[in-house]
Amino acid sequence: MQMTREELTQLMIDSAQNAIETTEQEFAVVLDESEQSLAVVDDVILSWLGKYESEALEENAVFTICNIYGAYVGELFRRKIGGFWKYDESDKRAPYVVLEYAGNTYAFAGICYQRLVNDSQISVKNYFEQAVANNRQ
């Protein structure tokens, strides 16, 4: 998949907006693009399981949920700290998007996946805060 950096950035901005709109439609919850909304993201990711049960764990649903919320969190980071979206194809069978800044990459969709699928104790908010702290030293 070949996308320019600008096209990928626009895709992630659109995906973040999709997270905002979908969250309001599905759960009547507002994501206001503030850092405080990251606690809401943690809750909403698990709310998908509560509302849709096993359907939320189907491959397409997991992909969509993790990518829109990953884009939302990544866009907050990008606006606060900087960086650029990068399409990582190192594993041709499982390409993914990361945010790169100062030589580090942040898998915001990946942390959403971990919370949704593997461990509800993992916090997207904490991951974000650690990523910010790593770049403020």
Image: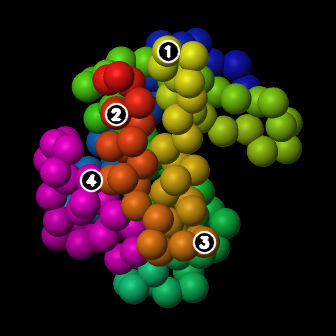
Please tell me the numbered disc located at residue 118: 3
The residue to which callout 4 is attached is 38
Which residue sits furthest right?
92
Q: Secondary structure at mark 4?
A: helix
Q: Which residues are magenta?
A: 25-47
Across and down, in percent, residue 77 comes to 33, 32
Count residues near mark 4 (Cα–Cα under 10 Å), then give few for <14, some for 14-19, many for 20+.
many
First of labels 4, 2 by sequence position? 4
Label of residue 133 in the image: 2
Vertical order, 48 against 96 (above or below): below
**Residue lying at 40% horizontally and 74% vertically, measured from the top left:** 46
Q: Are marks 3 and 1 in contact (CB under 8 Å)?
A: no
Image mark for residue 132: none
Helix, strand or loop status at disc 2: helix
Sequence-wise, the earlier of marks 4 and 3 is: 4
Which sits earlier in the primary sequence, circle 1 or circle 2? 1
Using a 10 Å C-alpha cutoff, classify the residue at mark 1 as few (fewer than 14 neighbours), some (14 to 19) or many (20 or more). few
Please name the residue that numbered disc 1 is placed on.
102
Query: Which quarter of the rendered picture does the C terminus lie within?
Result: top left
Residue type at numbered disc 4:
Leu
